C-alpha cells in the first residue's frame, strides 16, 4: 500500500500540470461549447435580419445556462428493446472520440518539421518566419474541407440534418444524453480548429512575428479590445432597458481592462516576461475563433450535399488530391534542401508544387465530368452542384 502511495505521488509530481489542464478543459469545455452555440445563433440571426436569443439574461447571455438546466431536468427515456449498455455508453464515447480523421492533409504540414510535438511545430514556423498555410495551401484547403465533413457540419450535416423529420442516430436519445452528442460536435469543432491553427496558422504567433518593423502589430490586440469597448459605450444609450444598459457598460469596462492587460507586456518593462503567454493566448484564441466563424458562415450560406456527393468529393477528389499534394510537397522539400532554401525562400519550390496540385485537381474534376457524361450522355453532372 505504501509503495502504491509513493508511486502515485511521484506520478503526480511529474504530471500534475497536464492533469490540471485536462481537468480544466473538461470542466470549462461544456461552458465554452454552450456559448459557441449562442454565438452561432446570434450570427445566424444577424444574417437573417433578426435578433436571436434575447429573453434570458442581457442580450440572451444566460440562454446557454437555461438550455443546460432544461436538458438536465428533462425526462430521460430509454427504449424498452434498446441495449442499455450501448445506449448509456454511446453519448459518452461520442464526446471522448472527438479527434480528427484528416490525416493525409496533416502529413504535408508535418513534413516541414519532422515532429508531432505541438510546441516544435509552432517554433518551426517562428524560426522559418512563415506560416505553413503559405507553404502548403492545398493541404490547408484539404484539411479545411475534411474537418467540416468530420464534424458533421453543414453542408455535410448528413447524419443529423436539421431539415430532416428525425435526428438520425440521435432520434431515441433525450435530455442530457442528447446534449452529449451536441457537445461532441462543438468539441470536435474546437479540436479541428486548434489543430489547423497549430499546424498551418502559426499557433500562438502573431502575423509576421519575425519581421521587426511590423512590431506595431503587437498593439492590434489592445486596439481590438478597446474598439469593442468603445462600441459598447456608443450602443449603451440605445438599449431598451436599464439592465441591458448596465450590462453594456460592464462589458465596455472589461474590454478596457483587458486592453490594459494586453498592452502592459509591450510597453512596461517589468511585464515583458508575460508577453508570450498573454499575447500568445490572444492570437491562438483569435485564430481558432475565426476558423469556427468560417464553419458557421458556411452553414448559413451553402446548401447541403447529398450523401453520394459527399462520398464522391472525399473518395474521388480530396483523397487523390491530398496524396498527390503530399508527394509534391516532399519533392519540393528535397529541392529546397538541395538549393539551401529556408523560410520565405521555400516558396520558390512549394509554389510550383501547389500549382501542380491545382492542375491535378482540375484534371480529376475533368475526369469526373467525362465519366458522368459517358455514363448518361443526356444527364447534367451534379458534381459541381452544391
Image (cartoon, rainbow, N blue to C red):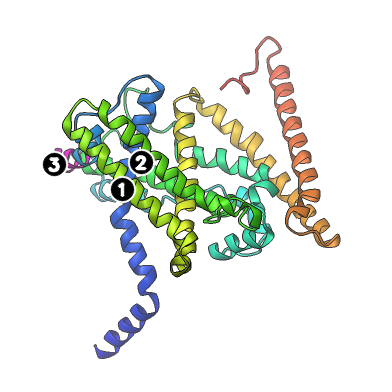
| Of the image marks 2 and 1, the number of the one nearer the N terminus | 2
Where 168 falls versus 255 (above or below)?
above
Tell me the distance, in whole angstroms, between the alpha carbons under discs 3 and 1: 34 Å
| Circle 3 Cα neighbour tier, 10 Å, few/some/many (<14 / 14–19 / ≥20) | few
Foreground residue, 16 or 213?
213
- Name the residue carrying label 2: 229
Q: Do the residues labelled 2 and 3 touch (CB within 8 Å)?
A: no
Whether residue 182 is visible: no
Q: Do the residues labelled 3 and 1 touch (CB within 8 Å)?
A: no
Q: Which residue is drawn at 45% across and 40% down?
A: 292
Would residue 298 be found to the left or right of residue 125 on screen? Answer: left
For label 1, the SS is helix
Q: Nearer the viewer, mark 2 or mark 3?
A: 2
**Taking 290 as reference, is 91 left or right?**
left
Rendered location of residue 63, percent (x, y): 23, 36
Is residue 71 magenta-colored?
yes
Amino acid at each position: 500500500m505504501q509503495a502504491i502511495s509513493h508511486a502515485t505521488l511521484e506520478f503526480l509530481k511529474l504530471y500534475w500540470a497536464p492533469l490540471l489542464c485536462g481537468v480544466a478543459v473538461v470542466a470549462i469545455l461544456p461552458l465554452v461549447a454552450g456559448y459557441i452555440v449562442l454565438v452561432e445563433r446570434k450570427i445566424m440571426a444577424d444574417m437573417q435580419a433578426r435578433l436571436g436569443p434575447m429573453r434570458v439574461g442581457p442580450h440572451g447571455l444566460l440562454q446557454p445556462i437555461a438550455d443546460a438546466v432544461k436538458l438536465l431536468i428533462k425526462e430521460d427515456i430509454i427504449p424498452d428493446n434498446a441495449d442499455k449498455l450501448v445506449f448509456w455508453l454511446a453519448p459518452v464515447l461520442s464526446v471522448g472520440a472527438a479527434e480528427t480523421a484528416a490525416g493525409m492533409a496533416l502529413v504535408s504540414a508535418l513534413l516541414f518539421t519532422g515532429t508531432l510535438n505541438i510546441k516544435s511545430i509552432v517554433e518551426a514556423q517562428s524560426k522559418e518566419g512563415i506560416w505553413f498555410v503559405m507553404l502548403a495551401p492545398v493541404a490547408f484547403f484539404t484539411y479545411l474541407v475534411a474537418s467540416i465533413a468530420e464534424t458533421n457540419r453543414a453542408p455535410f450535416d448528413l447524419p443529423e440534418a436539421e431539415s430532416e423529420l428525425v435526428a438520425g442516430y440521435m432520434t431515441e436519445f433525450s435530455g442530457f444524453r442528447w446534449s452529449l452528442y451536441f457537445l461532441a460536435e462543438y468539441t470536435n469543432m474546437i479540436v479541428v480548429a486548434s489543430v489547423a491553427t497549430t499546424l498551418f496558422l502559426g499557433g500562438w504567433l502573431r502575423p509576421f512575428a519575425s519581421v521587426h518593423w511590423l512590431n506595431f502589430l503587437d498593439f492590434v490586440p489592445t486596439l481590438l479590445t478597446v474598439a469593442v469597448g468603445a462600441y459598447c459605450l456608443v450602443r449603451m444609450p440605445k438599449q431598451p432597458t436599464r439592465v441591458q444598459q448596465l450590462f453594456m457598460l460592464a462589458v465596455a469596462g472589461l474590454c478596457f481592462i483587458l486592453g490594459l492587460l494586453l498592452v502592459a507586456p509591450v510597453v512596461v518593462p517589468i511585464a515583458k516576461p508575460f508577453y508570450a503567454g498573454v499575447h500568445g493566448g490572444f492570437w491562438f484564441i483569435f485564430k481558432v475563433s475565426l476558423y469556427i466563424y468560417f464553419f458557421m458562415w458556411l452553414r448559413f450560406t451553402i446548401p447541403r450535399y447529398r450523401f453520394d456527393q459527399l462520398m464522391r468529393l472525399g473518395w474521388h477528389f480530396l483523397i487523390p488530391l491530398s496524396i498527390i499534394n503530399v508527394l509534391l510537397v516532399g519533392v519540393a522539400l528535397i529541392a529546397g534542401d538541395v538549393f539551401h532554401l529556408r523560410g520565405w525562400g521555400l516558396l520558390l519550390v512549394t509554389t510550383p508544387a501547389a500549382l501542380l496540385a491545382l492542375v491535378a485537381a482540375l484534371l480529376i474534376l475533368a475526369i469526373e465530368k467525362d465519366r458522368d457524361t459517358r455514363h448518361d450522355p443526356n444527364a447534367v453532372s451534379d458534381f459541381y452542384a452544391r
